[in-house]
Structure formats: C-alpha cells, structure tokens
Image: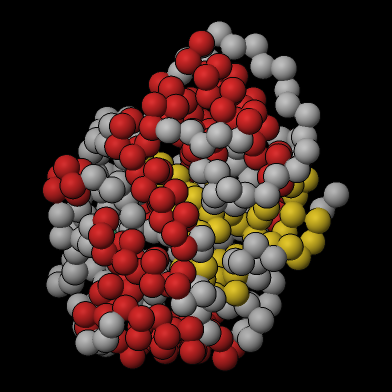
Amino acid sequence: MLDTMAIVPPEVLFRDPSLERVWTKVLVGERLDHADGMSCLQTWDVAALGQMADYVARRRHGDKVFFVLNRQLNPTNICVLDCIFCDFAARPKNDPRGYEMSWDEILAHVTGDINEIHIVGGLHHKWPYEKYVEIVRRIREKAPDLTIKAWTAVEIDFFAKIGKRSIEQVLEDMVEVGLDVLPGGGAEVFSQRVREALFKHKIGEQEWFRVHDAAHRMGIRSNCTLLYGHIETHEERVDHVIKLRDQQDKTGGFLAFIPLEYQVGTTKIVERQASAIEDLRTIAMSRLVFDNIPHVKSYWVMLGEQTAEMALNFGATDIDGTIGDEKIAHFALADSAAGHTTENLIRMIRAAGKIPVERDALYNEIRVHN
Ligand code: SF4
C-alpha cells in the first residue's frame, strides 16, 4: 500500500450502485478485488468513476502530474517476431519498410535538452549481443547525467538467448554501461488465449515476470503495461492488472503502469479504436485497483491529446513526455502529434487543473511549474 495524504473525499453522487461498494472500500483503504475492477470497467456512471479515481490519485500525489523532457529511440524496426497487432516491425529479409540506424543517427537522439531517453526496437536477426550493450554505453558516454530507460522484457530475454547469458547477466551488463530503468512494454495481455491469437512467438507471462522480478531484486526499477482495445475481454484486463499488483507486492519495483491503447492502423484486428470512455474507464479502474504502484500514465501518443488530458481527472498522474519523433504508434497511423513541446505538455496538464512537475525516468522531481 502506498503512502497517502489527508485529502477531503468528494461528495460523489452515485447513479450506479455497484460503484458504492467500491467507494466504501476506497474510503477505508481496503484493497479492491476482481469484481470491483469489473464494476469499474463496465459502469455507465463514468462521472462517479472519475471522481473516485481522481481522489485516489490526489491522495497519493496531490494535484501534481508528472512529465519528462525525453526522446524515444528505436534503433531498428527489423524483427524476428511477427506479432499480429504490430505495424512497426519489418521482416528480417527484403522488407522495404525495414531500417537500421547508423551510430550517428542513434547518437543524434542524445541532446542536452532532455532528461530521459527511452530505447526499444525490433529483435534484429543479425545484430550481436554486444551491439545492444554498446548502444547504451555510447549514449551514457555522450550524456553522463541522462536517465536511460532501455529494453523491454522481450528484448532482455532475446539478448539472453543471443548472448548466451542469464537474464541477470544481461541486466548486470546493461547496468554496468549505464542503464537506469526498464520500460514496461511487451506485457501485452497476460492471457494464453490472446497470446495464441496475437503474439504466439513472443515471450509469455512467465518470462515477462521473470525479467521484471530479476530486475527488481537487483534494485533496477521498471514500468509495466497493458495492451488493450483488441480481442481481450474486460475480465482479462482486470486479471492482468491484478497479476501486476501481485508482483508489486513481492518486489515493489514498478514505478508506473501504462495502459497502451491498441492502434488499429493497418493490422485492423478490430474495426475501431477503443472509445474515449473505454480509455477513461481503463485508466480509472487501474488507478483504483493498484494500491501499490505509484503512477498510472496517460500516454498521449496512443490516447490522443484530448483523451490524455481528460484522463488526468480519471486517476492518471503522468503524461509521459515530449518524445521527439514517435515511431511505433505512428507506423500504426496514430493521429496524435509525433512529439510535443514542453509548453504544450504544461498547457495540457494545467488545462486539467493540475500542477505540472518535470521529472526524470526515475520520477525524481526536476522542476515544479506552478
Ligand atoms: S511487437 Fe515488438 S516483438 Fe512483436 S513484432 Fe513488433 S517489434 Fe517485434
């Protein structure tokens, strides 16, 4: 359970009685169960849901909403896997969409105006283990004070295989050259049914947790994600969140949970993007169910700026960052901007009635913009 501040609870006018049971538990600090999570995801009383989630967020962080001056770096999109929902990856051979960045291109992402670099990419069929280590090492050499968030659990597991090392040895090597934090990608949905249908060659739940468990036990913090809005059920969404909460009980290393909205793009697993109401329900449900993860992120790239701003009143306390030139969601035709200025992020946070706080990848506060 996280530390909380004394905040006066709002008067909530409930139109859906199933939420009253959730509110009673929230007020006394009792942990929510699966049925409560389902009530949050399926309610039509979205206003009451938002008030509850916003209260929980304010109890933890006051009116602060965090953001980061960052850049995303995807050194290659060439990937040996074939996840059905992915518009980013290119096949290893003869795929005209494939790219590999040169060292100059990689290092051009590192400039003095950012506090975090976020590195993820494809699983290249020819790059040796040492290349991935070298990417982190050269970035650290160029920017000694930058926080480096790099490589999903899928990549760490892949590096262990190609480098013939244990997960712990890979993490040790990466930390030695400069890695600070692991991003949360690659979790998708912890459901064997969904995995079989959409990403059967990718690591599953057990291996994903194995990497984050090892990282946390070595003192490396990480994030966690959920890919939603495709064929997963509401039950599977809540199961996923509760499995992450169980892991956090054991190792306590997650900094933020990031619900990633599936981008229909050209993969078209479903006809339409999840609605804004569905996004807000998912953010609020996760804020209410996670009593042990500090932040739920409103990822503007996938939600779109308007929904991302609304989510700051539905329990989200982080809006990611400036990003630079986002590729993964934009290869899937996301209609948000590819990057934002600091001023835009501050404006979005203030428009939601919150206080913008600049952070690094470890959520160290750099500047409060009040
Ligand atoms: S989601 Fe990741 S692992 Fe899967 S195909 Fe795309 S880049 Fe490769």
Q: Is residue 225 visible?
A: no
Residue 317 % position (x, y): 64, 45
Residue 282 % position (x, y): 46, 34
Residue 87 % position (x, y): 29, 53
| Residue under the image location 59 percent in, 11 percent down | 14
| Residue under the image location 52 percent in, 19 percent down | 21
**Quadrant housing residue 49:** top right
Choose between 33 and 324: the one closer to the eye. Answer: 33
**Quadrant housing residue 43:** top left
Choose between 257 and 290: the one closer to the eye. Answer: 290
Q: Residue furthest top?
A: 15
Whether residue 148 sits left or right of residue 91 in the image: it is right
Choose between 278 and 59: the one closer to the eye. Answer: 59
| Residue under the image location 33 percent in, 90 percent down | 130
Choose between 240 and 261: the one closer to the eye. Answer: 240
Q: From this view, report whether residue 230 is shown above or below residue 325.
A: above
